[in-house]
Structures are given as C-alpha cells and as structure tokens.
C-alpha cells in the first residue's frame, strides 16, 4: 500500500488565496514557537515568539527548522510544522452566542488542528483550505498537509 | 506547461483526546468525502475525486510529528461561586482561584476569560446582564489576587450554557456560576 509520504507526483492546484478581511483585533496568540517563525502582516515580516499576538489576516510562516502553536479566542488550537505557510483569512466570534466564522488557508506545509467553540456551535463555521481542498470542521482533531 | 505540485494535499482525522472523534467534510472541486472515524484520510487527486482510506498513529507521527509537537496545551476552566447574597467567593471558590494561579504559572503566555452564567430564572436579557455583572465582579476579585487585569477578558453567556439542564424559570444554584478559563 502506498503510504501517505511516498505518493507519486500529482498535479495539484497551487494558487494563492487573497484575504479580504481587514481587522486590527487580536484573534489569537502564539503559545509555542521553535526555530524560525514569522508573522507576515501588511507587507512586514515580524518575529513570532511565544506571546506574540495574531491578528485576523496575518500569515504565519515557518522556516526549515521552525514550528509554532497558536491558541485562538474561541479556544481552538492550530499548530504548524516546518516550511509551512498558514493564512488567517477570517475570524469572527461572538462571545455570548458563540456564533462565528473561522477560515484559514494552509498554502504549504503541515498543520494540526483542535477545533473550539466556533466549530462546536455550527458545523462548517470553521474551515481550512489547502490548494486543492476545502475542509469543513465539525468539532474535531485533525492534521493537514498541503503539497507544493 | 502546468506547474507541477510534487505532493497532493492530505487531511487525516485524529481520535479526540476525550475519546470522541468528530468529523471533517472534505471538498475537492465539487466531490465530497466525509472523514468520521479515527485516522480516516482524504488525499486530493488530479481527477478531482479525493482518495480515501485509513492511516494510523505511526504514519501520522512520521508525517506530522513536528506540527503535533507544537500543539498548545488545552485551555482549562475553573468554576467559582459567590456566597449567597454577597459579592465574595465561597471558601471552595478561593481554592479554585489558587488552582487557577498555579495553572497560569505553568503557561508562558496565559490569557484569562471570565465567563458569567445564570440559571433560567428570568428573561434571557436579564440573565445576559446579570451574568456580565458577575463576571466583572470576578475580574475585580482576580485582580485583587494579583492577576494583571489586562490579561482578563470578560464575557456573559446568560442562561445559554447550564451545568444542570432545567426547564425555563426553574431555579438551580449550581448554574449561577462564573467560569474562569485560562488558555
């Protein structure tokens, strides 16, 4: 059986998704940061040590030896391995009703997800995109790899 | 010439830490697959129909070990109650506050959300206001215990999340609580 790691070369769509959300509110915080980890925000590249805030429309980037973990305001947790690019497209969360939307895009690399209150409240209110797939999250733990 | 992406995209559902496994709905170009058992995976294919199957813990560890190792710890909640008719914590609640402080000390960048809850006596609107007031009072008390108020967010859930489900307008003191969550 072919393992996940040794698939033969396949064509996949590698396109950049542009984010249209504009928000200055903090939606998450870096809780784990190892090696090279950056936040790309408004054409700037910022360091991302433990404690750094994550804003909606940030992109988190790791280098060859980098990995990072982020906890978001709805208590969802996302972590990325080396050579990864994770864009926060949108995070809206109503603390009273738990209604909201949380959309991210894994452009490349590896991602691990444990969903929080937004996904618990409505299935598919939390999504993760890869270059070729859209994942609707229904209260769960999962991992994703984006080919490049 | 089409740009070749060397490896396809893959998603693998993992068993939850609490023993429950959720689900992930995978869509590729209009074709769908539902992952709803532990280690179920979907892998994108040129044809547009994802390939599905089951992986296992060691394959997942091999491919995703670095990401998994950076997963932050689960947020933890502590529940505090007021002494009846007063604005002060019960003795048991003071113990919970000590546990909260210990949990904060274990985390490098802790954040606190204080969440007020009520029982179902009264209207939704009244309970939203009441739960907010109680949560704000707890924030004050926590600040007095030495926690930086800047690290504390306050929110009110009103009667939406009872510990003990009841019919509307039934008093239940165990639901009249404030939850202090640290992430």
Image (cartoon, coloured by chain):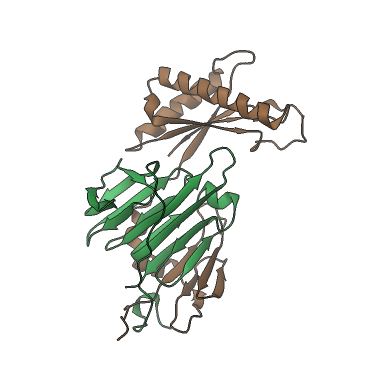
Question: What residue lies at 64% left-to-right and 15% top-to-bottom?
Answer: B84
Letter of the chain shown brown in the rendering:
B
Residue B130 is at least partly visible in this image: yes
Q: Position of residue B32 (x, y in %)?
A: 56, 73
Question: What residue lies at 77% left-to-right and 36% top-to-bottom?
Answer: B167
Q: Position of residue A67 (x, y in %)?
A: 29, 55
Question: What residue lies at 46% left-to-right and 56% top-to-bottom?
Answer: A103
On the image, which quarter does residue B66 sit in? Answer: bottom left
Q: Name the quarter where the N terminus of chain A is drawn.
A: bottom left
Q: Position of residue B150 (x, y in %)?
A: 38, 27
Foreground residue, A36 or A95?
Answer: A95
Q: Along the horizontal axis of the image, is A6 left or right of B99?
A: left
Letter of the chain shown green in the rendering:
A
Q: Is residue B175 above or below residue B91?
A: below
| Name of the residue lying farthest toward the bottom | B1
Q: Name the quarter where the C terminus of chain A is drawn.
A: bottom left
């Amino acid at each position: 059986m072919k393992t996940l790691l040794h698939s033969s070369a396949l064509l996949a769509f590698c396109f950049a998704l542009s984010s249209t959300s504009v928000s200055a509110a903090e939606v998450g915080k870096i809780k784990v940061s190892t090696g090279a980890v950056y936040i790309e925000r408004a054409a700037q590249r910022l360091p991302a040590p433990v404690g750094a805030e994550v804003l909606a429309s940030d992109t988190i980037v790791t280098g060859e030896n980098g990995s990072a973990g982020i906890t978001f305001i709805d208590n969802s947790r996302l972590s990325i391995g080396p050579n990864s690019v994770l864009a926060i497209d949108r995070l809206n969360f109503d603390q009273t009703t738990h209604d909201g939307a949380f959309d991210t895009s894994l452009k490349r690399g590896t991602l691990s997800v444990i969903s929080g209150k937004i996904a618990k409240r409505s299935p598919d209110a939390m999504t993760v995109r890869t270059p070729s797939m859209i994942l609707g999250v229904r209260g769960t733990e999962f991992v994703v790899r984006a080919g490049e | 010439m089409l740009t070749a992406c060397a490896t396809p995209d893959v998603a693998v559902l993992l068993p939850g830490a609490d023993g429950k496994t959720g689900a992930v709905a995978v869509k590729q170009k209009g074709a769908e697959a539902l992952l709803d058992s532990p280690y179920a995976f979907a892998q994108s294919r040129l044809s547009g129909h994802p390939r599905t199957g089951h992986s296992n813990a060691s394959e997942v560890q091999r491919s995703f070990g670095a990401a998994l190792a950076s997963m932050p710890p689960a947020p933890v909640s502590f529940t505090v109650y007021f002494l009846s008719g007063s604005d002060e914590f019960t003795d048991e609640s003071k113990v919970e506050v000590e546990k909260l402080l210990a949990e904060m000390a274990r985390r490098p960048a802790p954040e606190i959300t204080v969440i007020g809850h009520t029982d179902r006596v009264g209207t939704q609107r009244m309970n939203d206001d009441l739960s907010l007031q109680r949560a704000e009072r707890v924030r004050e008390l926590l600040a007095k215990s030495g926690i930086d108020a800047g690290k504390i967010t306050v929110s009110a859930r009103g009667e939406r999340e009872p510990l003990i489900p009841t019919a509307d307008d039934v008093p239940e003191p165990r639901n009249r609580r404030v939850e202090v969550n640290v992430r």
